[in-house]
Image: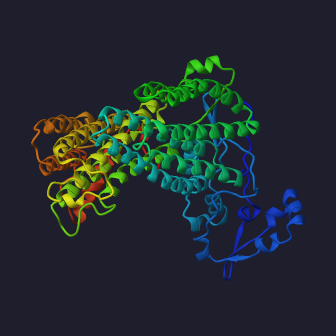
Amino acid sequence: MPEPESSPDQSLSPVLLAPIEPTSSGVQLTSTDTEKDPDVKERKGHHGHRKNQLHREVSEEELEHVEVRGIARRFVVSRPRALQYTYHDQVISNVVRDEEMAFRRSARPELSDLSREDSEESHHHHHHDPGNAEGIAKSRERVDLFIDLIWVGIISNLSEVYSALFFDPEQSQGLAVGVFIIAFTASWRIWNILREFMSNYYMDDVLQRLFIFWILVLSVFYGNQLAYLPEDIEKYKHYVIILYLFIRASFAAMEAIYAIFIPWLRWVCVFHTVLMLPAVGLWIAGMELKGNKALGPILCALVWEYFVPVALDTKVANRLTPNQYRKALDPRHFQSRFASFFILAVGEGVLQLISRGPLGVGITGTAAVSVWSLNIYFIISFLYFNRDQSKYYIPAVRRKGWRVLLWVSFHIPLFSSFLTLASSVMFMLRNHAQLPENVDQNDEKVPAEDLRDYIYSSMWTMSVSLSIILISMTCLALLDKSLDPPGTLRVNNRYVRLSGRIVYVVVILTVPIKKDLSMDLYLGIAGVMMSFLTSWEWVVSLEKGGSFFEPRGLTAILSSNRRAKKQFSSVPDAIRPNNEGA
């Protein structure tokens, strides 16, 4: 196997590796061992001030609070490298371990509370998951948070586009749904490509920072053009498509530059570029065609773009291509970013309950609408992050293959349905019968004769959106592999635990059949049923021996310890914590 690409962080600073000796005032760094190293001696000739640093005093109290910068900055522009990649299906990482832990271990193990067992566990963890060094993760997370600020605005505009087109008497509701699906999928693709770039190549040098800023600038313009789509789709779709293609081309150009320094990436770039050319042609055709005729080529372009990376990651592609290198997935960053996008999608609905004061002054008749809506958003968030409630499980993103593809695929309808749900709830709030003055003066009001029909449509939209959300989350939960031994939970069968979601879907789709149903009653039914659903999943997923109230007293503690020891003996060896030596 060829030697992996070098990393700028492969060696720790002599300051960090220098032994520490106790002094009367605390501990002191010495340079005894480092002076034996000829490389260190040579560097000391160029850095005379290093000696003073090696002999500075550090108290025991200060040592407990020492932190190390997450990413070493030795160069303004670093040589591009992949953080992780695969060679003959073996994952290779270019990320070193956490320097902060190395400092503490080399300095004073007794002060850092790193026992022999903890060190072995840490080594075992990094051996299996070397691409998640603490410094890289923290630094990248901060940039990801800023990126999400841009997508808060883009998601808000997408929700407004759907609401403006769907509840416009002069527009076709079918066209509104089609435009929204295309706009959302394209926007999500931009976000996902940026996520992949950050996951594969994050270095935090000046060149990369400038490129990320360039992508964010284009994204700001892209998001602004989305807001004008309801005014004239034929006119503004040209701006949206051109900006989308420009963003895609920017990523392709940057990866081509990186391929100059990463030899194995060249074949990947060539194949990817050639296979993406048909999608560019379909986008251009969508720009030229008018009306509903443009939907076909654009949808085909999005589908093509989605499945090209999937096809390149198959075994058939591995046999047909001469390159044995492939991009590797960073599971932790992958999961974290999708969880962040989930919060963005849910946050759009919550934001609209507050933005521009749709509830009016004081406690009004619209309060019930907002409370039930907030209840639904809150419970859905709980259900998403609790998966199928298993105690021991393997996430789908760790299992590779078709499960990862399905895991990503189910997130697309999940995220988009949150925006249609938010649009329908917002329409109900703005057009509540008891408070007509809550309709924003800047919004185009729906004629009174059509209002009842559009409220009825908003109920159906909400029911369908909730159904898609729950079905998608159920499928995502089932993609995980449960490892719970028999008797771990009150109800060990996860299909039984999740059965309440199917019942909810069936009922919520039948509620709007009654056309004269009031808005408050509909939201009340949806909210109460959601509360029963989460109560069911909470109770049946309690660990065996649990109760409604936590007991008090020493007897209860001893009883709990005995149950835990008995349950531990039934846990499979593959997932049992290695703490026998503790």
Up the image or down, 425 lies above or below 494; here it is below
Q: How many marks?
A: 0
Whether residue 383 is visible here, answered yes or no, is: yes
Whether residue 574 is visible here, answered yes or no, is: no
Report whether 437 appears left or right of 257.
left
Residue 69's quadrant in the figure? Answer: bottom right
- The coloring applied to the image is rainbow
Residue 433's quadrant in the figure? Answer: bottom left
Q: Residue at x 25, y 65 (%)?
A: 554
Q: Residue 262 in the image: x percent, y percent?
A: 73, 37
Along the line of sight, which residue is nearer the eye, 139 or 413? 413
Up the image or down, 326 lies above or below 461; here it is above
Q: Residue at x 58, y 71 (%)?
A: 65
Up the image or down, 58 lies above or below 97; here it is below
Report whether 511 appears left or right of 163.
left
Report whether 525 appears left or right of 411.
left
Q: Residue 113 in the image: x percent, y percent?
A: 54, 64
Report whether 579 appears left or right of 434.
right
Q: Residue 122 in the image: x percent, y percent?
A: 56, 51
Along the line of sight, which residue is nearer the eye, 417 or 201? 417
Q: Residue 125 in the image: x percent, y percent?
A: 54, 46
Residue 418's quadrant in the figure? Answer: top left
Quarter of the image with the N terminus is top right
Along the line of sight, which residue is nearer the eye, 121 or 356? 356
